[in-house]
Every structure is written in structure tokens, then in C-alpha cells.
């Protein structure tokens, strides 16, 4: 009787566990479906903006009036209301990021800019053109002036405590004013990102160029790599990036040599910038050690050596037998 009771109890407990597991699975599946549906809904409702051009570089004389056009595309499913404001910017970090500001800077541009329309509605999957005019004052300071047009959405009014988020997109505008322009720069640093590299990894060089003048430029350059014997094994072009005044621009260049590399290498950097093709140079060195290849071989040699020493008596005996000598001789 007691045994039957225990069996019934075990069956009941097992049934309860199975039911609980099924309930947890069903709830989990329901939550997953709700989360997925919510994610899809958020994705469908997301605002998508695209601007062309993203970078505008212009040259002008004091007193000039320059016209240009930006085209904004609404890639979202609903119409959006857009307003446009002009801003100056400051460099942020060394990778080309900028910080928009309403403050006047030494290289301000926003006060010269007007745009039409300043506010408009763009239907779903449609584009709108914005006419921009830059009126350069007669007494404009020669050199570089920088700014941006900020295209931002105006969220629709909603009742209740709902957080309304505005999205922005801002192309960069660089203007070079003719006159007494100072083009000067220096290489802040040039180095290999590691002193010792594997033979299988791309070798990376970091070039940092400091603009000490008053106008932006886009330097070109080349890295020449030589082996321990002084022979040139590779020449690599560095990426061209704008460097604005009082800022450092960092560029990473990869050497993806598929062949075998080993030993000490030197790298020479040549940078050319400005209207007069001024030249800057710098050097660095690094070592390539193919440890992925050498380490297994070295481990095998050490293992064989250890085994040979550990069983040296047996190996000696085996060699004597193979040579036909008697163990008693």
C-alpha cells in the first residue's frame, strides 16, 4: 500500500514538473514573440535620414557670394517635419569627429550662412532640396572657415509624459578664403602600433599630423618599408584625410603582406601637404617574429630532446641491437 502511494506521489510530482516546464516554455515563447514584434515595430517606425553631399569643400575670395544645394531624403514610412540651423564646429578627438557649437570660434562660418527653406515637411520616401548661400564679408579673415547645416526632425506633439526624440544629420562645410594663408604642419608622431608583430597579423602604422597653420589641408603620403638588409619590401599609400587648424588627425595604415616576414624592419614616412607640396618625414622600426610557426616547432624539438634524454639508455640499447652488436660485448 505504502509502495503504491509512493508511486502515485512520484507520478504526481513528475506531472507537476512537466506542467510547470510547459508553462515556463509557453510564457517564454510569448515574451519572445512580444519582444520580437515590438522590435519590428520600433524598426518600422524608425526615422531614416540621408544627406547629399555629406562633405562640401569650397574656395572663395572676400566679398564673394556662394550658392550650393543640399538634398535630404526621408527614408522612413511617415512624413517628417524638418528644420535647419547653421552651426560652427570644433574638432573632437583625432579621428575626424566634430562637436557642433553655437559659439563663435577662430574659424567660424555659420554667421555667413543662410538656407531656404528653414523649415519644411518631407513625405515618406521623398527628397527635398535646401538652397544654401554663403556670403563672405569683405574683411573676412584669410584661411579656413568651418561649419555645418544641422537638419533635425521636429517630433509631433503628443499628449502625456512622452519623451520626444529629435534626430539630426549634419554635413561638414569647409571654406578656404584666399589671402595671406599660412599652410604649416608637423608630424606629431609616427609609429608601429606594436614593437613585435606576428607573421600572420597585418602590421599597423599610426600617423598623427598636426595642423599648425590657419587653413585646412588633405595630406597625401607614403610609407616605405625596408628589411634588415636595407632592401625595400613594400610601399604603402596612406589614406588622405582633412586636417583642420589647431587639430591633430590620426590615420591608421595596414601592411597586409601575405609572404613570410621575419626580423627587424624599418619604416620611413613621407607626407606631402599644401598648395606648395611641402614635405614632412619621419621614421620608425619594428620586429616581425613568426611565433605561430616557430613555437610549435620549438615545442616539438624540446619534447623530442626531453624524450631522448629520458629514454637514452633504451635508445642506446636499441641502436646497438640494430647495428648488430651484442649486449654483452
Image: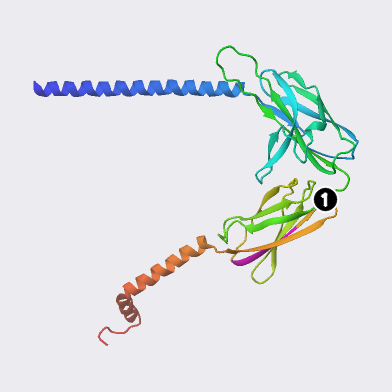
**Is most of the magenta stretch helix, strand or loop?**
strand
Residue 304 occupies quadrant: bottom left
Q: How many labels does the image show?
A: 1
The region drawn magenta spans: 263-270
On the rendered image, what quadrant is the N terminus found in?
A: top left
Q: Which of 328 and 240 is in front in this view?
A: 240
- Label 1 Cα crowd, 10 Å radius (few <14 / some 14-19 / many 20+): some
Residue 313 placed where, x, y %? 30, 77
Q: Mark 1 points at which residue?
A: 182
Task: Answer yes or no: is residue 14 visible.
Answer: yes
Residue 121 placed where, x, y %? 74, 18
Residue visible at 56% across and 13% down in the picture: 160
In the image, farthest residue toward the left: 1
In the displayed structure, 249 sits above or below 149; it is below
Residue 32 placed where, x, y %? 46, 24
Residue 207 placed where, x, y %? 68, 54
Label 1: which secondary element: loop
Residue 135 occupies quadrant: top right
Compared across the picture, whether 257 is left or right of 87 comes to left
252 magenta-colored: no
Q: Nearer the viewer, residue 318 or 92?
A: 92
On the rendered image, what quadrant is the C terminus found in?
A: bottom left
Compared across the picture, whether 46 is left or right of 217 comes to left
Amino acid at each position: 500500500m505504502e509502495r503504491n502511494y509512493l508511486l502515485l506521489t512520484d507520478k504526481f510530482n513528475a506531472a507537476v514538473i512537466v506542467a510547470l516546464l510547459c508553462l515556463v516554455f509557453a510564457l517564454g515563447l510569448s515574451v519572445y514573440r512580444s519582444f520580437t514584434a515590438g522590435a519590428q515595430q520600433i524598426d518600422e517606425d524608425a526615422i531614416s535620414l540621408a544627406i547629399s553631399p555629406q562633405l562640401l569643400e569650397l574656395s572663395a575670395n572676400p566679398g564673394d557670394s556662394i550658392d550650393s544645394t543640399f538634398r535630404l531624403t526621408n527614408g522612413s514610412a511617415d512624413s517628417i517635419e524638418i528644420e535647419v540651423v547653421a552651426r560652427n564646429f570644433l574638432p573632437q578627438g583625432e579621428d575626424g569627429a566634430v562637436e557642433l557649437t553655437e559659439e563663435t570660434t577662430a574659424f567660424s562660418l555659420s554667421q555667413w550662412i543662410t538656407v531656404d527653406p528653414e523649415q519644411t515637411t518631407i513625405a515618406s520616401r521623398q527628397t527635398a532640396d535646401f538652397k544654401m548661400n554663403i556670403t563672405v564679408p569683405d574683411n573676412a579673415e584669410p584661411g579656413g572657415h568651418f561649419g555645418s547645416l544641422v537638419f533635425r526632425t521636429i517630433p509631433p506633439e503628443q499628449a502625456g509624459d512622452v519623451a520626444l526624440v529629435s534626430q539630426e544629420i549634419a554635413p561638414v562645410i569647409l571654406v578656404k578664403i584666399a589671402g595671406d594663408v599660412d599652410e604649416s604642419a608637423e608630424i606629431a608622431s609616427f609609429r608601429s602600433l606594436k614593437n613585435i608583430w606576428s607573421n600572420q597579423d597585418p602590421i599597423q602604422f599610426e600617423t598623427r599630423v598636426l595642423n599648425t597653420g590657419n587653413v585646412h589641408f588633405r595630406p597625401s603620403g607614403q610609407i616605405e618599408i625596408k628589411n634588415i638588409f636595407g632592401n625595400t619590401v613594400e610601399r604603402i599609400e596612406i589614406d588622405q584625410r582633412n586636417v583642420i587648424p589647431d587639430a591633430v588627425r590620426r590615420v591608421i595604415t595596414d601592411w597586409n603582406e601575405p609572404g613570410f616576414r621575419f626580423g627587424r624592419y624599418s619604416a620611413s614616412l613621407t607626407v606631402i601637404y599644401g598648395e606648395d607640396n611641402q614635405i614632412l618625414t619621419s621614421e620608425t622600426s619594428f620586429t616581425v617574429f613568426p611565433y605561430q610557426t616557430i613555437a610549435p616547432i620549438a615545442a616539438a624539438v624540446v619534447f623530442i630532446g626531453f624524450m631522448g634524454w629520458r629514454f637514452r639508455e633504451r635508445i642506446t640499447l636499441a641502436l646497438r641491437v640494430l647495428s648488430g652488436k651484442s649486449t654483452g660485448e
